Image (tube, grey):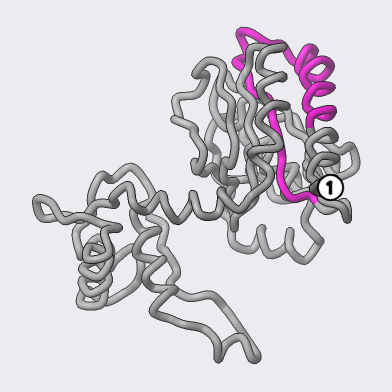
Amino acid sequence: MAIVRNRDVLCGPARHEYVQSIARGFAVIKAFSGKADSLTITDVAQRTTLSRAAARRFLLTLKELGYVAHQEGGFRLTPRVLDLGFTFLSTMKLPDVAQPVMEDIVSKVHESCSIAVLDGSDIVYVARVPAKRIMSIALAVGARLEAYPTSMGRVLLAGLEPEGLDRYFSMVTLRPITKWTITNMAKLRRVIEQVREQGWALVDQEVELGLRSVAAPIRDRSGRTIAAINISSHVSRVNLKDMRIRHLSLVIQAAAQISKMLCAPES
């Protein structure tokens, strides 16, 4: 079971500005990640490394604020936690700019189109236009997937500075999600370097059997990768040749178009 760390490693002046109680509160919220509908105080304490008494105080505080509810001996998140994500999304220009471009892609290929950003070792979906459900994983805005086996994740990792990529590999465990998932760190580094050089990523059945996708970077004015856009499809509908030619061309064009619109001065 993954442990939610309740403090970051800070040094220098930033260490004196660190508010540990806020970090612990977010750690408690993040402890609910996974398939469990509800958690007990003991569950939360184990997932956050907090004492049971501290976990209880944070849960009761979050309950008072409306972010968790207590029911049948356990705590569960309430829809109010979505406010935290929606506050972020409401400040982003990206989803609004990208929506018509993504809808155009879906109308042409009849496959799902998504945009994600990198958050720690995960990608987080910030925009999505689905076509048909092709994954057993339910994906929506706010959904998270591990970065290393995904096309968007590899594009985002390729956009990191060397120090950032080293930091990523120091905190991630490469596990075989399918028999095709790359779990050798040296090989994955070579793949990410290739993605950096060519400007796109194609992943074939590494996240889920039967699923393949292609992605390209969305960049800011300085050329920094700030997000990734992909087209995903089932192997029964799109072969690798079509994915490399038609779908790749569309996703690269869309990424360039969105990047240009993001960089355009607002009227």
Q: Residue furthest top?
A: 237
Residue drawn at the location 61% of the way across and 86% of the way down:
14
Q: Where does the image place residue 41, in percent across and percent down from the top left? A: 20, 64
Residue drawn at the location 63% of the way across and 32% of the way down:
114
Residue 95 higher or lower than 40, as above or below: above
Classify the position of the N terminus by image quarter: bottom left
- Indicate yes or no whether the magenta region holds residue 155: no
Q: Left or right: where does residue 66 sit relative to residue 175?
A: left
Which residues make up the magenta segment? 225-254
Q: Where does the image place residue 44, in percent across and percent down from the top left? A: 28, 63
Task: Out of 87 and 168, give the one closest to the viewer.
Answer: 87
Residue drawn at the location 48% of the way across and 52% of the way down:
85
Q: Left or right: where does residue 22 sit relative to residue 98?
A: left
Residue drawn at the location 78% of the way across and 41% of the way down:
217
Q: Residue furthest left?
A: 72
Residue 64, located in which quarter of the rendered image? Answer: bottom left
Residue 66 higher or lower than 136, as above or below: below
Residue 222, located in which quarter of the rendered image? Answer: bottom right
Task: Out of 223 and 11, give the one closest to the viewer.
Answer: 223
Q: Left or right: where does residue 176 sit relative to residue 169?
A: left
Residue 50, located in which quarter of the rendered image? Answer: bottom left
> Dot 1: within a 10 Å radius of its alpha carbon, few (fewer than 14), some, or many (20 or more) residues?
few
Task: Out of 69 and 178, give the one closest to the viewer.
Answer: 69
Residue 115 higher or lower than 118, as above or below: above
- Indicate yes or no whether the magenta region holds residue 252: yes
Q: How many marks?
A: 1
Q: Where does the image place residue 153, in percent across and percent down from the top left? A: 67, 43
Q: Residue furthest front?
A: 267
Which residue position holds label 1? 263
Q: Where does the image place residue 184, in percent across and percent down from the top left? A: 68, 46
The amino acid type of the residue labelled 1 equals Cys
